[in-house]
Amino acid sequence: MPVRRRHIHALVERLLHSAHVDVAPIDVVKLAKGLGADVQYQPADENLSGFILRNRKERRAIIGVNSTHHEKPSAIHDRP
């Protein structure tokens, strides 16, 4: 496993542990909101699935999800 991939895996494991998540499916919207992110669903261009806009100064993030690609809520059923 490349170094970057190991680093990301370790970060995800810590995040899930701190959120007391140990079984799938994972409610990623609830997880994001629990970290202070605002998750918004809006239609967007076909080539855009989503984005994250971070304001480091205010320590806020907005996660934009293309509602024509994804239904809400979203869950990941298998962890890496």
Image: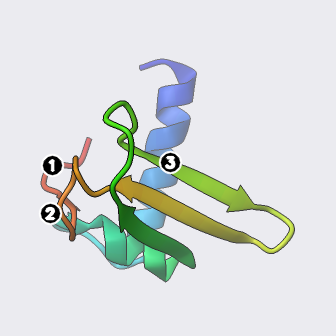
Q: Is residue 52 left or right of residue 20?
A: right
Task: Indicate the amino acid at tag 1.
Answer: Asp
Q: How crowded is mark 1: few (under 14 residues within 10 Å), some or many (20 or more)?
A: few
Read off the residue under disc 1.
78
Depicted 41 relative to depicted 45: above or below = below
Please report the residue visible at 21 percent of the width from the left and 70 percent of the height from the top.
73
User: Local crowd at mark 3 within 10 Å, few (<14), some, or many (≥20)?
Assistant: few
Foreground: disc 3 or disc 1: 3
Left or right of residue 70: residue 51:
right
Q: Residue 24 carries which label?
A: 2
Q: Nearer the viewer, residue 27 or 60?
A: 60
SS at mark 1 in the image:
loop
Amino acid under label 2? Ala
Residue 65 in sight from this viewpoint: yes
Does label 1 or label 2 sit earlier along the sequence?
A: 2
Is residue 18 something that shows in the picture? no
Mark closer to the observer (2, 3): 3
At horizontal 14% and vertical 64% (from top left) the residue drawn is 25
Residue found at x 17% / y 67%: 23
**Nearer-the-camera pick, 71 or 46:** 46
Q: Distance between the residues labelled 2 and 3?
A: 24 Å
Q: Do the residues labelled 1 and 2 touch (CB within 8 Å)?
A: yes
Q: Distance between the residues labelled 3 and 1?
A: 22 Å
Q: How far apart are marks 1 and 2 (CA)?
A: 6 Å
Q: Mark 3 points at which residue?
A: 51
* Callout 3 secondary element: strand
Q: What element carries label 2?
A: loop
Q: Residue furthest top?
A: 2
x and y, in percent, of residue 2 in the image: 49, 18
